[in-house]
Amino acid sequence: MKSKFFQIFKQKKPIIGMVHFPPLLGYKDHPGLSYIEKKALKDLESLEKGGADAFMIENNYDIPHKIFVPPEVISSFTILAYKLRKASALPMGISVLWNDYKTALSIAKIVKAQFIRIPVFVDKVKTNYGVIEGNPKEILAYRKKIKAEKVALFTDIHVKHAKLIERKKIEDSAKEAIKAGSDALILTGEWTGKPPKIEVLKKLRKIIGNFPILIGSGITSKNLKKYIKLADGFIVGTFLKTGKKRKNEINLKKFTEKIDPKKVKLLLKEREKYLKS
């Protein structure tokens, strides 16, 4: 059976642009839902103007994160997801940090988003917000329970901002995730803005064949060429924003920074160079 990834994306090597929400309801710096809605819609508009192939929404600035988010975050996230879904026909993804697959799947089902991101699917990791152990059987059972089987699962392996507790090679995590029901693997560097090592990507590609791999961090217009032959798609956030990077911060740019459509176009231009060569 053809992977859901290839059913969602007709475009080769799709660029998935991130729409990062400012702090949601209940967080100290929450600027109000009206502000977040306007900014998110503007960022989505910039992604579309730049030619992005899809978008994914995420509660990026809810610091400190919780493994499973509280009701006030669920409600505000759902409202915003509904507004953004109405505004665009692009494929849409949901990522609820830190690892709230229940909320992500439920929102995806309600608003008809095509995929969700799950940072911890088969690994066991230690984060700043607690220890998280992946349980793919529970995740698939919950997806079935709410009749959201059409929603694809894009799953990280050896995810960034986390320390692997168990001794497990990344290729073993990859094979385990595929067997457990992942629809695409996400490969990241160790931190936001850091790309994965090209040697790791080469190793994975050799081992898992044509199964889809997404690069989930650190892609820019300057390094895309290095990864595009081996990867099937790219999740891009930080590079597309205005403003300077901040040192020693989980989020390298402030939540007030916006998506720059010129940067989106620049990235797509590099992608087209490869596809035409």
Image (cartoon, rainbow, N blue to C red):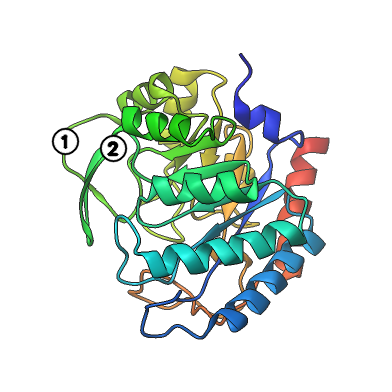
Q: Quadrant of the N terminus?
A: top right
Residue on which the image places disc 1: 166
Say which residue appears at 49% left-offset and 80% top-offset: 254
196 is higher (above) or lower (below) than 23: above
Residue located 62% across and 31% down the image: 5
* Nearest to the observer: residue 198 or residue 49: 49
Disc 2 marks a residue whose amino acid type is: Gly
Q: Secondary structure at mark 2?
A: loop
Question: Which amino acid lies under the numbered mark 1 shown in the image of this protein?
Answer: Glu
Mark 2 packing: few (<14 Cα in 10 Å), some, or many (20+)?
A: some
Residue depth check, mark 2 versus mark 1: number of the one nearer the observer = 2
Report x, y in % for residue 136. 34, 30
Residue linked to disc 2: 134
As drawn, 25 above or below 176: below
* 4 on left or right of 105: right
Residue 187 seen in render: yes
Helix, strand or loop under label 1: loop
The spot of residue 155 in percent (x, y) is 44, 38
- Where residue 25 sits, quadrant-wise, is bottom left
Q: Nearer the viewer, residue 154 or 276?
A: 154
